Image: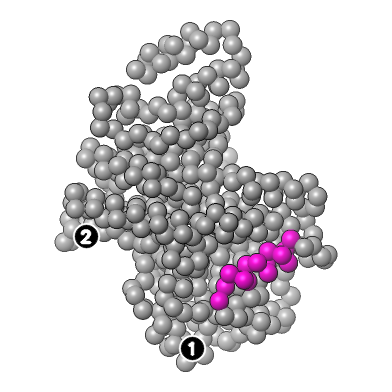
Amino acid sequence: MMHKLTSSFRRLTVGKDKLGRCRLYSQLTQHQSPLEESESAGGVPTIPAFDYTPPPYVGPTADEIFRKRKEFLSPSMFYLYKKPLNVVHGKMQYLFDENGRRYLDGFGGIATVNCGHCHPDVVQAIINQVTTIQHSTILYLNHCIADFASALAGKLPGDLKVVFFTNSGTEANELALMIARLYTGCQDIISLRNAYHGNAAGTMGATAQSNWKFNIVQGVGGIVELAPNYLPPVYNSIKKAGGLVIADEVQSGFARTGTNFWGFQNQGIVPDIVTMAKGIGNGIPLGAVVTTPEIAKVLTRRSYFNTFGGNPVCTAAGHAVLKVIERENLQENAHVVGSYLKERLTALKDKHDIIGDVRGRGLILGVELVTDRKLKTPANTEILEIMETMKDLGVLVGKGGFYGNVFRITPPLCFTKEDADFLVDAMDYSMSKL
């Protein structure tokens, strides 16, 4: 069928310009997938309908980009799939490649998108701000940073109301470490194994890429949720010893767990310091540290500032994100759709022995793949094959865990039950094809 499609494409575009070719090719291929073409007899999951057509793409091809990337970018950069996708457009829970092919984004939430790709309210807030003033953080007043700080503090419990803005989760965690050490006078950090909190010297040293504070739903480690009532006794022990509790909400915050706005609330504690990033800005570089007025005073002992942290453009975007989450009731959606998705994934475990565990809550879920359920032998080769087939069907998911054998399912919070069905059906089909 692809040969016929390509032939028709060539005939229909004779004499047309590049823009016309791109538009036509987008229309012809938007709902096509290699598996749908090769197995048209039925049984192949079909991506839900979506009334939107992306603008035509006239940029360089995936091959051209990949050649430049290999030559000019760091060799440490990695990518998913045998042939990396050239993602050129996004709309809510969907992504589009250079050919106009549409994919369901089951991973974008961890990649910072909570409200949905290119949410119009967030986009407009950025445009409005960037056309007035982009930078005035340190030396002058600007209402954007104060308005967002006030709104953000209103979403936190207890006396957590002093906000420090950063550019990323790594910076937020570095600052949290500094604050805790200044306040306690102690350098020691107690943490969970296999956690990840950033790529700077302090966070990497504190974890040894394995150990430091509490990551309330351990994302990179394979969506490992803390056992019920785990944190309260830990919190009490730390407080008795004169320590501070830092909650890393970079991945689990901003309504992602569904039942609460913050992951730590699922454990019934109020930490001393909270760090956040990713979903806070829906794709804009933004992070934050929130603590109490008493603890915040310690930074007056140091000349701390952040040149771009809290700039008007980023804080305008962050404030818009907060408003969208509240107005569109995305926390409730994360709970309802996430619970439904977890039920369907758990049912899939009964069908496929390769699924060793399904865990998480809301729209931060993990599916661990094993070749032996008793031994929990990681299926780290099989997961790659399943991911490739799911991608061919039109579903993108991430992977993580210590052995790289856990699907990380963290879609934008606008995910629907129809999307959940398609994701699970695509996973079911792909596992059946192993």
| Above or below: residue 264 compared with residue 104 | below
Q: Which residues make up the magenta segment? A: 144-157
Q: Earlier in the sequence, mark 2 or mark 1?
A: 1
Numbered disc in front, either 2 or 1: 1
| Above or below: residue 18 compared with residue 365 | above
Q: Is residue 427 magenta?
A: no
Instruction: In the displayed orientation, state which residue is furthest to the bottom.
Output: 240
| Residue 175 visible | no
| Above or below: residue 353 compared with residue 192 | above
Q: Residue at x 46, y 28 (%)?
A: 30
Identify the residue position indicated by label 2 in the image: 376
Q: If the image is split into quadrants, where does the N terminus sit? A: top left
Q: Specify how the rendered protein is coloured.
A: one colour
Question: Which quadrant of the structure image shows residue 338?
Answer: bottom left
Tell me the amino acid under the disc marked 1.
Answer: Lys
Element under disc 1: helix
| Residue 399 visible | yes
Residue 276 x %, y %:
56, 65
Q: Is residue 156 magenta?
A: yes
Question: Is 134 placed left or right of 350 in the picture?
Answer: right
Residue 56 x %, y %:
58, 26
Element under disc 2: loop
Q: Residue at x 77, y 63 (%)?
A: 143
Identify the residue position indicated by label 1 in the image: 239
Residue in the foreground of this view, choosing between 291 and 77: 291
Tell me the amino acid under the disc marked 2.
Answer: Lys
Q: If the image is split into quadrants, where does the C terminus sit? A: top left
Residue 407 x %, y %:
35, 52
Residue in the foreground of this view, choosing between 81 and 410: 410
